[in-house]
Image (spheres, rainbow, N blue to C red):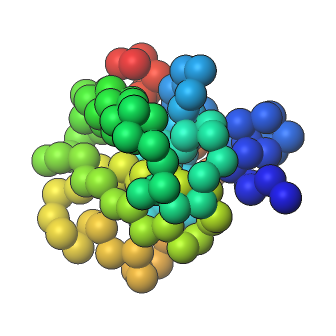
Amino acid sequence: MSSVFTKIINRVLPAYIVAEDNEHIAFLDINPIAYGHLLVVPKLEVDYIFDIEDPQYIKLFSFAKKVSLAMKKAISCQRISISVIGTEVPHAHIHLIPTNSISDVNFEKEKLSLTHDNMVEITEKIKKFI
């Protein structure tokens, strides 16, 4: 069975996509812990990130770096933090989170409630720098 991320990749489910190439996609997290929080996902459906073969793993992190550089230009923050948890969806993914302190990367805190217009605005801001 395909993951929710594969359904986004295949455009079965909608998403706020900020970047994409032949092997990866980046889109806003629908339950963000910070303004601009997004996910970087390989199009190849692999559950555990460390099961990705080295060449693809390196490409995934290179793509994440490209996206994070655009995020840093688009969103006011000290840095873009990275997290790989891997328990929420059985499809490897990287969280990129705009942060000003370590508490900004607390996944147990209340999620932001953003409107569709907020999400579109964030998407467009980041896409300008891709």
Q: Position of residue 6 (x, y in %)?
A: 73, 45
Q: Nearer the viewer, residue 113 or 18?
A: 18
For residue 122, side relative to residue 113 (left or right): left
Return the x and y of residue 48 as percentages of the image width and height. 52, 61
**Count of numbered circles in the view:** 0
* In this picture, residue 79 sits left or right of residue 25: left
Residue under the point 27% across and 67% down: 104
* In the displayed structure image, the side of residue 9 where residue 119 appears, left or right: left
The answer to whether residue 92 is above or below residue 62 is below
Q: Considering the image in quadrants, where does the N terminus appear?
A: bottom right
Residue in the picture at 46% in, 22% down: 127
Q: Is residue 40 above or below residue 115?
A: above
Residue 105 visible within the image: yes
Q: Position of residue 3 (x, y in %)?
A: 74, 56
Residue at 23% in and 41% down: 76
Q: Nearer the viewer, residue 49 or 82?
A: 49
**Residue 64 in the image: x percent, y percent?**
37, 37
Q: Quadrant of the C terminus?
A: top left
- Regarding residue 67, the answer to whether it shows in the image is no
| Residue shown at 40% from the left, 80% from the top | 109
Nearer to me, 2 or 114: 2
Q: What is the quadrant of residue 60 in the picture? A: top left
Answer above or below: position of 21 versus 28: above
Q: Is residue 59 left or right of residue 115?
A: left
